[in-house]
Amino acid sequence: MIAQAPKPKAEAGQPTAAVVMSGQDDYRPTNDTAFDIETGPSGKGEGSLLDPLESRVVAIGYYEVCRDVYLIAYDLDEAAMLRQFWGAFLSLHGAGAKLLGFNTQGFDLPFLIRRSWHHGVDVPRVVLSNGKYWPDTVVDLMIAWRCGGYKDFISLDNLAKFLGVGAKNGDGELFYLKWNQDRDAAIAYLANDVRLCADCAAKMGFTDDITT
């Protein structure tokens, strides 16, 4: 069952509601969807939250553009969230819809693959297409920003400000602590991030304009 989450603290142009779902829920989006992952310690020490050897997926945020729906997957069972993600991935790919994100090929997707290997969760073969990772339905805005180059980097916050679609509303480095200490703020932070990705993608011409 998908439970209604508390409403995040919203400002103008920011999301006003999100739904928290468990990893057990069957999630099969069929229209352009932005996503972002948040990580935390795996329980084996206090290593880097960017290292899949020492950290795990804590939550995955989704924003369905056409439906204007925010979903946040949260489950103590990391493997369940990973299976759910790959189900969503295959559903989007099968529908020809885009999976939108920022630096996803540099971080989010490799992290999800490696944690899936750790748990023995099947990674779809379609992620390896034409001798390279990721089909054309995966849109990484960081790669798009580089315009074919390799040295041009930008943060999501600066990209959003440059495009005039908003700004980040916090720092996700300690998201796993915020989730337990201030659930509303954590939800608002992750919902805002996925909305920024969708709005940037629209401004850059990758999907329909949904900026309000």
Image (cartoon, rainbow, N blue to C red):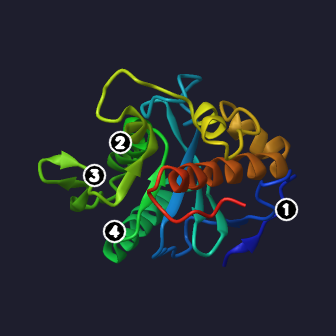
Residue indicated by mark 3: 134
Residue type at the position of mark 4: His
Task: Report how far apart the C-alphas of labels 1 and 3 lie in the structure.
Answer: 34 Å
Q: Disc 3 and disc 2: Cα gap in Å?
A: 15 Å
What residue would you read off at disc 4? 93
What amino acid is labelled 1 in the image? Lys
| Up-down relation of residue 158 to residue 32 (above or below) | above
Which numbered disc, 3 or 2, marks the residue that appears first in the sequence? 2
Q: What residue is drawn where x is 52% and y is 66%?
A: 208
Residue 26 rendering spot, x and y as whole percentages = 51, 76
Q: Can the viewer see residue 60?
A: no
Residue matched to label 1: 7
Report the Cα–Cα distance between label 3 and label 4: 10 Å
Give the structural element (helix, strand or loop) at label 3: loop
Disc nearer the start of the sequence (3/4): 4
Residue 87 screen position, x and y as percent: 40, 69
Measured from the top left, where is residue 5 in percent x and y?
79, 65
Where residue 185 sits in the image (x, y, percent)? 82, 46
Q: Report if the CB atoms under discs 2 and 4 are less than 8 Å apart.
A: no
